[in-house]
Each structure stands twice: as structure tokens, then as C-alpha cells.
Amino acid sequence: MSSFLYDLFRKSSERTKTMGELDFWELIDTIDHEYGGDSEAVISSLVRHLKNCSDEYIFTFDDKLSELIYSLDGRQWAEELFGNEPFNEEKFLSARAAAVAAGRQHYFDVLGHKCPLSGEHIHEYKGRWYGITDGLITAAADAWVRKHLQEVNNYPHETSFSLKSHSNSANW
């Protein structure tokens, strides 16, 4: 195990009840973008880490992720992504998740409109849109499922913020 991942595991084991902002972004930095189109492989180290943490820690990660994705739910980001193309909810969600997965600096640049919300790593396949970091959206549930050897429909946590497009009415 690399020293970075070991330090991250040690810190999360010591603070099993809460996850701070820095902890969240350190976890995001474990995303391995080199796996290309395999969304599960891209976030596999993050899921492996989370499954060894307390449920509360997993749920806090899920809440923080939902908050960040929700914050990018708005007209300006949709217009940056789609331009004159028709709006697509799947593509919009994938792009917002990819902005988080790209790391703290990139996320805040997109949030502050210093760089556009991009669909660069999102592709259409058989009428559906997929992003290489879409696995991030279900990472907490996947970790909980692996930890408790349960089915995903038994995941007991509802996130604090909706991931659905147009749910952040203040930004539309």
C-alpha cells in the first residue's frame, strides 16, 4: 500500500465519525483516471478505502459529494455544457460528477465559472450517456454494500442533496 493511501486510511480510522473538507478531497485524489472507460476501476481505490470506514464516514462522504454535485446544478453550467444541443439529464449529471472527480481546484474553477463544465470524458453509447467517473456517484453505496455484504437496495442512507437536474431551483 502506498504511503499516501496508508496515511489516508490511518487518518480515516482515527476519525471514524466525521469527514472534513480536506479528507473528502484527499479521497477524491485517489481516483485513478488512467483506467479510461471503466468507471468502476477508476474509483476502485476510493471504494476499497471507504468500505473499511465507519458507516457514518461513508454517509458523510456521500452527503458531501451530493452537495458538490447539487451546487453545479444550474442554468449557467448547463448552457456551458450543451450550448445549442438539447439538454440531457444523464450527460449533465456525468459532467457534474466529473468536475468533482477532477479535484478540488478544478471543481472550484468550474463552480466559479473560471473554466467551463466539460463533457470531454462523457460519451454516448446505445442512446445513454456515460462518463468515466460515473462510478463516483454510487461509490459510497458500493462501499457500504461491500462492507456489509448486502444488496444495493438495502443501502440505508439518503443524501442531503438531490442529484437530479433542476433540483437546485435557486440556480435555475
Image (spheres, helix red, strand yellow):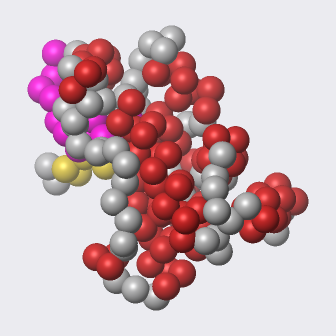
Whether residue 153 is visible, yes or no, is yes
**At 53% across and 29% down in the image, what residue appears?**
107
Is residue 87 part of the magenta span, yes or no?
A: yes
Q: Nearer the viewer, residue 156 or 102?
A: 156
Image position of 91 with respect to 143: above or below: above
For the stretch drawn in magenta, the main secondary structure is: helix
Image quarter (top left, top right, bottom left or bottom right) of the C terminus? top left
Place of residue 114 in the rendered image (x, y in percent of width and height, measured from the top left): 51, 11
Is residue 2 part of the magenta span, yes or no?
A: no
Place of residue 43 in the rendered image (x, y in percent of width and height, measured from the top left): 54, 58
Image quarter (top left, top right, bottom left or bottom right) of the N terminus? bottom right
| Residue segment shown in magenta | 84-96
Q: Nearer the viewer, residue 37 or 94?
A: 94
Left or right of 164 on screen, residue 145 = right
**At 40% across and 45% down in the image, what residue appears?**
66
**At 65% across and 74% down in the image, what residue appears?**
52
Place of residue 28 in the rendered image (x, y in percent of width and height, measured from the top left): 61, 47
Image position of 7 with respect to 23: above or below: below
Place of residue 162 in the rendered image (x, y in percent of width and height, measured from the top left): 29, 45
**At 17% across and 36% down in the image, what residue appears?**
88
Q: Nearer the viewer, residue 44 or 156?
A: 156
Q: Quadrant of residue 124?
A: top left
Whether residue 44 is visible, yes or no, is no
Q: Quadrant of residue 168?
A: top left
